[in-house]
Amino acid sequence: MKIGFIGLGNMGGPMAANLARAGHEVMGHDPSAPMPEGVRPAASAAEAVRAARVVITMLPNGAILRAVAAEAIPAMAAGAVLCDCSTVDVDSARAVAGQAQAAGLGALDAPVSGGIGGAAAGTLTFMVGGAAEAFAVVAPLFEVMGQKTVHCGASGAGQAAKICNNMILGATMIATCEAFALADKLGLERQKMFDVVSTSSGYSWSMNAYCPAPGVGPTSPADNDYKPGFAAELMLKDLRLSQQAAAAADAATPMGALAETLYARFVEAEGGRGRDFSAMLPWLATKHNR
């Protein structure tokens, strides 16, 4: 399949490389990131998409997505599918989908879970919104780039699923880090707490698969000095998207709001930028209940 790929950074680069290795003809564009192996460079977004059956974007935010879509959509071939894998606000996802559909194109919002490691290994999870016809076209590509794909509904549903999932993740990571910090002060060994909680009602992905305590549980960024697998500032971005959506939908999300406040403090005022989101543990371990 001929694929245009726009946004070849830490996530998009390995995703595009996996498509090329699978035999697809991939033309990529990124103003700053290096071109992945097997991907042909394009001088502009318009050049990258012109002959493509599917155009995939992986971009930092909704404003950039809208700007790229404004350039790419007029250059795309009739009947092609625009598949955005960025994590952006629901309004931007729906606006771009509407523009694509008005131009006779298919449109999907397909944010991912699995981080940089999942992008490289081809084990991402895709949460997809959009029409069934467009989903059927891109489904074989999701199988190359990931291990699980869920068609969540109409345009915007993929982004809704992503921000709801990551709101849960942010809140549970904070609770997990708080529990370890409390265990320390109560004299409970971290390994003993893990042994209990990981097989009890406190079980969670944050505890069992991505434990924030070094040397406890499966290997995680905590065992690599909290170098980011999923950076704290990206968690903050997703939590802010969740609260933007909650305000628009008039939904009560007090735990999500508190998680956003704590990650904002951690990232913007207390050294969390550039660290993994699980580095909330050493930060909390220095705090006192006052």
Image (cartoon, helix red, strand yellow):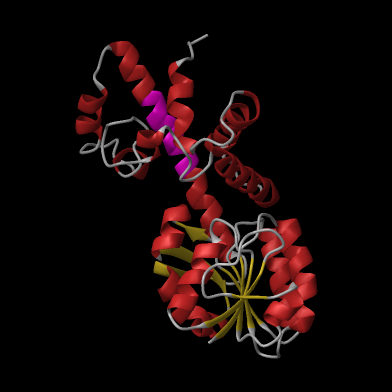
Q: Residue at x 46, y 61 (%)?
A: 119
Number of callouts:
0
Residue sticking out furthest to the top: 290
Q: Nearer the viewer, residue 194 or 8?
A: 8
* Placement of 248 over or under 158, stated as above or below: above
Q: Nearer the viewer, residue 39 or 221?
A: 39
Indicate yes or no whether the magenta region holds residue 175: yes
Residue 232: give x, y in percent of width and height: 54, 38
Q: Nearer the viewer, residue 278 or 203?
A: 278
Residue 151 appears in the rendering: no
Q: Residue at x 42, y 37 (%)?
A: 172
* Placement of 95 over or under 246, stated as above or below: below
- In the picture provided, is 193 more to the left or to the right than 172? left
Q: Residue at x 66, y 52 (%)?
A: 249
- In the picture provided, is 208 more to the left or to the right than 50? left
Residue 154: give x, y in percent of width and height: 58, 72
Residue 150 image-quadrant placement: bottom left
Q: Which stretch appears magenta?
A: 169-179
Residue 217: give x, y in percent of width and height: 26, 37
Residue 57 appears in the rendering: yes
- In the picture provided, is 191 more to the left or to the right than 262? left
Residue 72: give x, y in percent of width and height: 75, 76
Question: Taken as a whole, is the magenta stretch helix, strand or loop?
Answer: helix
Residue 174 image-quadrant placement: top left
* Placement of 193 over or under 111, stated as above or below: above
Indicate yes or no whether the magenta region holds residue 254: no
Q: Residue at x 50, y 67 (%)?
A: 15
